[in-house]
Image: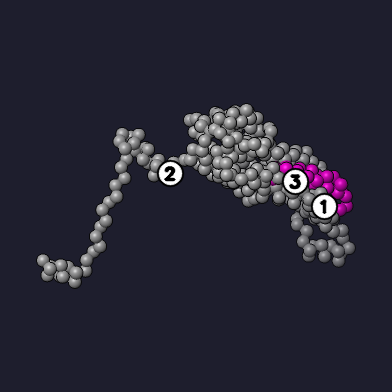
Amino acid sequence: MSTPDASTPTTPDEALAWEAAHRTKASIAAWAAAALALGGGIVTSLAYSALPAYPDKVVTITDALGDLAAGQTIPAGRAAYQLHWISDHPAALTIGPLLTALSALLVFGVLAYLFQAVKARALRFGRSPLVFAAIGAVAYGVGSAVVGVGRVVAAGNFSATGTNADAVDALGSGPIAVGTVLQLLGSFSLGFAFIMIALNAMRVGLLTRFMGVLGMIVGATFVLPLDQQGIIRSFWLLAIGFLFAGRWPRGAPAAWRTGRAEPWPSTSRVRQQQAAAAGGQAVLETPAPTPPPQSSGQRRKKRKKK
């Protein structure tokens, strides 16, 4: 979908018109990003769960020195063994990161649409979250693809007689190192963008408190290892797609209909509204202050005055 231009809508009618024109694309982007994130996470997790351990035992330094002293061949080690296994099973370890990369690129369209909606209702909301979303989506997507494909390429080029040290060097090669740095940069950028956009969307009433808090949690999962399979991220993206499409249960929040900020009422205000709806305006009475207890001396002085 197209990204917001420099001319942000300044009236409710302009905001609603822009959102209506881009609603379908934003919904499709959210649903596709959800499916790709979940698929990429599951495929990658299953692939690495099938990664075998060393067939006999872990080769320790003591074992290696003993084999060397006895004139025996030192086993290649776990890293080399697993790299050979990756070279024999490249499909899943290539497809998974590519699906994740495509999902990250589509996430930018979702965040850009939500950012524009927030910006139209809170004109002082800065554009830095949108910039971080763009940087994060590209860096995270490209980094994930480079790391995943680079690992498979390194495994395919790994020598059959390579040692454990050779395997470690292969996995730390230039492209993989660059991809790792890009992926890390993208994680922090996307995390910041998710938190700021979801927080402000909740403040102006575009997201319910549940969806706003969950969106901030999704941002945190880009930095913290809390959602390895992408389940939380996919759920939020799937739900936000239905919200964009106007298919939210019980109707979309009022801010989507009015084009204005509609902050959520406070807890006390909700109680008053519930009491009024139950049959009568809730009246909050302030209880009279309880006088402090008097000492025995104060009571005697009071009796003497009487």
Q: Which residue is mark 3?
A: 143
**Residue ID for mark 2:** 266
Distance between mark 1 and mark 3 Cα atoms? 14 Å
Residue 53: within the magenta?
no
Q: Position of residue 24 (x, y in %)?
A: 63, 28
Label 2 packing within 10 angstroms: few (<14), some (14-19), many (20+)? few
**Point 67% across, 48% down: residue:** 189
Determine whether the residue tagged by mark 2 lies in a helix, strand or loop: loop
The coloring applied to the image is one colour
Which residue occupies 23% across, 64% down? 293
User: Residue 4 or 87: which is nearer the viewer?
Assistant: 4
Residue range highlighted in magenta = 136-162
Asked which secondary structure carries label 1, the reply is loop
Kind of residue indicated by mark 2: Ser
Image spot of residue 253 (x, y percent): 50, 34
Q: Which secondary structure, mark 3?
A: helix
| Labels 1 and 3 touching (C-beta < 8 A) | no
Residue 114 visible in the displayed image:
no
Dot 1 or dot 3: first in sequence order is: 3
Q: Nearer the viewer, mark 2 or mark 1?
A: 2
Query: Label 1: how many residues lie within 10 Å, few (<14), some (14-19) or many (20+)?
Result: few
Q: Amino acid at mark 1?
A: Ser
Against 211, residue 27 (above or below) is above
Sequence-wise, which precedes: disc 3 or disc 2? 3
The answer to whether residue 161 is above or below residue 260 is below
Q: Which residue is mark 1?
A: 173
Q: Furthest-bottom residue in view?
A: 297
Q: Nearer the viewer, residue 288 or 278?
A: 288
Separation (CA) of disc 3 from disc 2: 42 Å
Asked if residue 298 shows in the view, the reply is yes
